[in-house]
Image (cartoon, rainbow, N blue to C red):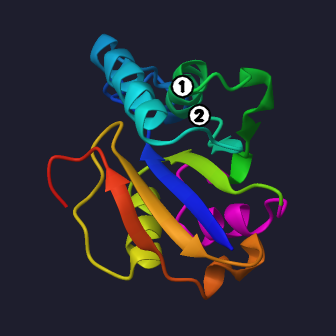
């Protein structure tokens, strides 16, 4: 069965400074624009997503809500997974593997380096680090999401300048 993972890095966030926790960093004005443009790109290239899963950090949550709005996805249905905050590939894979089988297309929003490592693993190829608001759409042949550990994907589309 064909499944799709849209791997997305959060949009541009404010610089980290010592008095502000990293978790609380917000999107910049440019980041908000990036998220809107990415939302339009996803909507133009994919009819819908069945699930939006994100880290609960302020910048990923804000990116997720903007993308949800562009995709006509109810932001109340966004799944915020605390373990995905600055998560590496293993935690991201685990989150995907627990999705219900009725979900066919997922939009996963996370942080580097983990989000890029996930894309590299799913595609079984080296790619450059995802820039803010970059999306890679990966098709996988999986009977169920728990098979993600052995599935290798095919790049369907992306909004990056290079890959």
Q: Which residue is mark 2?
A: 57
Residue 52 located left or right of residue 77? left
Residue 117: percent from left, percent from top = 41, 68
At numbered mark 1, what does the secondary structure look like: helix, strand or loop?
helix
Residue at left 76%, top 55%? 103
Q: Please check the rendered image and state whether residue 53 is part of the magenta-colored stretch, yes or no.
A: no
Residue 162 located left or right of residue 16? left
Residue at left 80%, top 65%? 98
Residue 150 located left or right of residue 144? left
Give the residue at the far bottom of this rendering: 150
- How packed mark 1 is, by other alpha carbons closer than 10 Å (few <14, some 14-19, many 20 or more), is some
- Residue placed most toward the observer, 91 or 103: 103
At numbered mark 2, what does the secondary structure look like: helix, strand or loop?
loop
Residue 24 disc label: 1
Residue at left 74%, top 69%? 97
Highlighted range, magenta? 84-101
Disc 1 and disc 2 in contact, CB within 8 angstroms: yes
Residue 142: percent from left, percent from top = 67, 78
């Amino acid at each position: 069965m064909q499944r799709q993972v849209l791997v997305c890095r959060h949009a541009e966030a404010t610089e980290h400074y010592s008095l502000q926790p990293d978790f609380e960093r917000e999107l910049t004005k440019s980041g908000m624009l990036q998220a809107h443009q990415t939302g339009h790109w996803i909507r133009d290239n994919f009819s819908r997503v069945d699930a939006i899963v994100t880290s609960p950090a302020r910048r990923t949550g804000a990116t997720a809500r903007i993308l949800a709005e562009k995709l006509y996805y109810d932001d109340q249905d966004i799944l915020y997974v605390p373990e995905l905050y600055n998560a590496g590939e293993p935690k991201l894979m685990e989150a995907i593997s627990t999705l219900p089988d009725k979900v066919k297309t997922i939009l996963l929003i996370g942080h580097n380096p983990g989000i890029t490592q996930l894309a590299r693993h799913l595609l079984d190829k080296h790619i450059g680090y995802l820039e803010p608001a970059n999306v890679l759409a990966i098709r996988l042949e999986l009977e169920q999401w728990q098979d993600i550990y052995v599935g290798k994907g095919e790049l369907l589309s992306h909004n990056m300048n290079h890959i």
